[in-house]
Image (cartoon, rainbow, N blue to C red):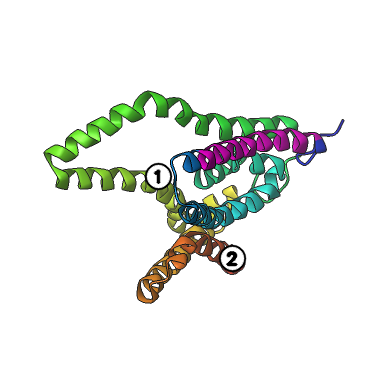
Amino acid sequence: MEFSANHPIIFIIVGIVVALVLGQSIYFLVKALKRAKQIGMATSTVKKTVTSSITFTIAPAVAILVGVVSLSVSLGVPLPWLRLSVVGSLSYETVAASNTLLALGLDMSTLITDASAFVTVAWVMTIGICLGLFLVPLLTKKIQNGMISLENKDKKWMEIFNNAMFLGMISAFVGYVFCDVSNLFRSAEWLATQGVSRTECLIPVLVMLVSAIVMIVLGLLSKKTKQRWITDYALPISLVLGMASAIPFTMWLG
């Protein structure tokens, strides 16, 4: 039987897993509503909490949907749907998939037709992200206690340490954006052997700049108008506009 990344069997398997996760969410929602009623929480407070939670869920869901659409070009719909619906991270899954496809001699613009390549990509995306499932219960409490202890000793140093960890995480993805900029200074012969143009390495850099500018503008607009919803939807808006800008940049530099 010919392999297909969009085979109905894969859709069924993924649908079962997603249904289990949704069932778990509904179970805890019902339990929470019952508990709120037991402790006498006001109905208006419960409704406000549920409504705000729904609103704050939609914003990141838009960004996730964009990731599913972009990954589905090469991986089909079921796998990205599964990875970004359960434990997956949009930034991680995209990088993991593209690096694996590159190592296999494939690219993100062509649908996988080889079963072994598909399984390889799925394993890389899954094993890497699942590491956190084991580290969180083992190390989170120790890390939190250490950070609380550090904050009690020196609150200023704690803020510096926390910001440094966040910037370290972001730097890993920023490095991925700039990793090919050196192509601007390589010889024409080397570029020809690699099958790349001199300027296409600037595409991810320009896309990042567009996304950053959109995020800054939305942040300033939210601060000026005092509209909280702008901040909530800043990420998906900047993500969508950044991806849209990749089209003219690719036509120009690719």
Q: Give the range drawn in magenta.
A: 9-34
The amino acid sitting under disc 1 is Ala
Q: Which mark is residue 244?
A: 2
Q: How far apart are marks 1 and 2 (CA)?
A: 23 Å
Q: Which residue lies furthest to the bottom in this view?
A: 225
Q: How many marks?
A: 2
In x, y percent, where is residue 76?
Answer: 72, 44
Q: Mark 1 points at which residue?
A: 172
Q: Residue 114 carries which label?
A: none
Q: Which residue is drawn at 37% across and 72% down?
A: 220
- Local crowd size for mark 2, using a 10 Å CA cut-off: few (<14), some (14–19), many (≥20): few
Q: Which residue is drawn at 53% across and 47% down?
A: 90
For label 2, the SS is: helix
The reply, left or right, for residue 145 in relation to residue 74 is left
Q: Does the magenta stretch include residue 27?
A: yes
In x, y percent, where is residue 31?
Answer: 54, 36
Callouts 1 and 2 close, C-beta under 8 Å: no
Q: Does the magenta stretch include residue 241?
A: no
Q: Nearer the viewer, residue 40 or 56?
A: 40
- Local crowd size for mark 1, using a 10 Å CA cut-off: few (<14), some (14–19), many (≥20): few
Q: Work out whether 12 lies above or below 91.
A: above
**Residue 131 visible (yes or no):** yes
Q: Nearer the viewer, residue 181 or 120?
A: 120
Question: Taken as a whole, is the magenta stretch helix, strand or loop?
Answer: helix
